[in-house]
Every structure is written in structure tokens, then in C-alpha cells.
Amino acid sequence: MGLMVSEKLPDHFMIGEIQVDRIAHHDLEAWHFAVDRLGLKGIDIFTGPRPSIGGIRWINGTSRDQAFTTVSGLALAMAEKSAQAGLPLDGVKMFVYAGEKSPDALRRVGEFIEFWQGRHIASVDMGTKLADMQIVRETTQYVSTVNPSPYTARGVASAMRTCTKLYGTKPSDLRVFVSGVCGEVGFSLAQELIRDGMQVLGNDITQDEDRIAAVKGLGVEFFSESRLPLPEEKVHVYAPCAGGGVLNRTTIPLLRQAGIWLVNGSANCQLAAGRSSAEHMHILGIDWAKDDVTNRGGLLAVAHEFSLVTDMEGKINETGQIVFDLIELSHELDRPVSDVAREYFAKHIKDAA
């Protein structure tokens, strides 16, 4: 893959009809792109010069500042996820915050991605579907058309199974609450957990009646409101599979009151306040499956499609053991998972080098 040397690019330039402007940032390489004719506006952020895998998030009507804050955190999370999975990649993420998601707009996004010649390998994310990626592929070769959701769900389910050893129980004894159960990953996760004999409750705010019916058809006890598990539901595991920032000073005590043992879901950037949120959970005795470890299956699937990983299946299958090791080490050292993870992966990456 031929990589663009971004430092040699001007701060403002055109890619066809796409206006591209550098966004000043002391750590990250950030670019704003727009097509006035379409009302299309988006931000793409790179953490480094190497190839990177990251989704195209499309939420029309988001403010530019909110999009920038969100995509900055997600790009950094993708970089950390890649490093922890032993992949020779940096991090990247795109957020389209204005403009309808039309075929024309998707093709312009593809042209922008093609310009970077493999620095951004794109995939689905919130607000986009595989059908959208097929249209993006009309103007770039650097987009995945593999559905990453089942692979992500497999990694999360693997962690769920393995972590039962921490509690002296077995998968069929677990009650799991999947938030965002009608989403691609949430639905796939519910399938995996029910196959393992777990009892699954779930919620989603979707109005898609067909999707809700499909979820109920799996045997999920479904709730349409946005809420956390309740104490009377006797749930053991909370699996956030929608937006990030769900673990905060308000929700963490409520999860403790509900009797939650473990938080293990596919959502990115779950800790609203970073380490302090992780420490809060640790103090209250709630175990946390580090999100960029447990949800790495989708990244590995896209990396495999582009020949950037040789043992996708093996790496997905070892996800559960890594999550178990991190939580066990957190117990032994009486420190938050976020702290012990840094040392754990520093050692393992060094040993693998």
C-alpha cells in the first residue's frame, strides 16, 4: 500500500469536488472534508502514518465539535486495539456529521478514502451498512465488504464463557442484559449467548418492528425503553453494544445495585471518564472486560480481508482468555483493569517482537 506523506500536503486542497482542510491538533492528524453541492461534511482522523482500519460513522445533524471529540477518541481506541491485537497498524476513524447518506455522497466518501492509498481501510460503523460499503467500493479499493459484527460478537461471547471461571459458575447459569440488542453486534451476540445456554434480556430504542420480532424470536426477553438492568431481574452480566460513555458516575452505582458481576460488551469507549470510571468500578467490585480487547473480532476480520493478519481465528478465540487474565490480574494486584492492561500488553507486545 502506497502511503501519502501527510506533512507534505498543503493545509487546504481539493480532491475533485471535495474540499479538504487540515484541522490543527497537537497529537493527531485530522482532516475536514466537504462537498458543498451535497451538504456533505465529515472528519477523518489518523493517529499515525501506517495503514489503519476504522469505520465510517454517519450521523447527520451532529455538531462539528461533537463529531471531532467523538472521532478523536475512537481513532485512539482503534490504535490501541490494533496494538493489543499485535497488528502493525495505527488508528483511524471517520465521522460524517452533515449530509444525507445518498449513493452520490457515499461515492464522494470513497474518493476521499482512495486518496490516502491504504492509510484508511474503511468499514461499517454506526449509521452505515454493508450495502453502503458496496457503494463506497465503487470509488475506492480500501473498504471492507465483510460484515464484522458476527466476529465482534464471537470475541465478546468468548470472554463471557471464559469469565464464568471467575465466579465458579457455568454459562448456562448466567443471565445477561444486552443493551442495543437490535443492532448488528447486539443481535449476533444474543445468538451466541443463547446458543451457549445463557438467559438473555435486552433493550433497544429502535422502531423496527421486524427486527424486534426477530430478537424476540431468539428467545430474548425484550424491553423497548433505554435503561439499565434492574435488581429484581437478577442479571449477572451487562453487555453494552450501542454507544460509548455508558459507564459513568451515575450508571456504575446503579449497576452495582443491580448486582452486576461483569460488564462485557462490544461498545467502544465505554468509560465516560477514562481511568476514574475504571477505578470506580473496581472499588465497587464490578469486573470490566476492557472494551478494545473484547470487541476486537471485527477489526481482525477486516485485517484478514486485507491480508494484514494470518491467524484471525486463533486471535478471536484467544480473546476470552486475555479478558480473563486481565480481570484475574486486576484482582490479584487490587488495581483497575485499565491499569494492569498497560503493563500486560507492554510485556506481551515486547515478547512477541
Image: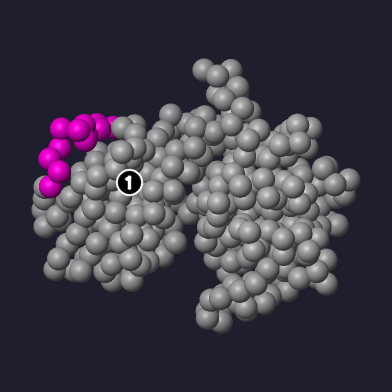
Where is residue 297 drawn, in percent x and y? 56, 45
Front-lying residue, 130 or 78: 78
User: At which x and y percent is residue 243?
Assistant: 52, 61
Say whether residue 80 is magenta: no
Residue for point 54% across, 34% down: 85
Q: Is residue 261 left or right of residue 301?
A: right
Q: Is residue 4 magenta?
A: yes
Q: Examine the image and state in which quarter residue 325 appears.
A: top right
- The local secondary structure at tag 1 comes to strand
Give the class, few, some or many, for how many residues have Cα within 10 Å of label 1's Cα (few <14, many ≥20). Answer: many
Q: Quadrant of the N terminus?
A: top left
Residue 351 left/right relative to 54: right
What number of labels is visible? 1
Question: Which is nearer the eye, 283 or 77?
Answer: 283
Q: Is residue 233 above or below residue 310?
A: below
User: Residue 31 or 275: which is nearer the viewer?
Assistant: 275
The residue shown at (11%, 47%) is: 13
Q: Please provide the residue range marked out in magenta.
A: 1-12
Q: Quadrant of residue 135?
A: bottom left
Left or right? Give the position of 284 relative to 8.
right
Residue 173 placed where, x, y %?
A: 86, 57
In percent of width and height, residue 219 lies at 73, 71
Q: Visible in this render: residue 141?
A: no
Foreground of the two, 69 or 55: 69
Which residue shows up at 85% across the image and 47% down it? 167
SS assignment for the magenta stretch, majority: loop
**Amino acid type assigned to the residue bearing label 1 in the image:** Ile
Residue of label 1: 45
Applied colour scheme? one colour
Above or below, 243 against 143 in this view is below
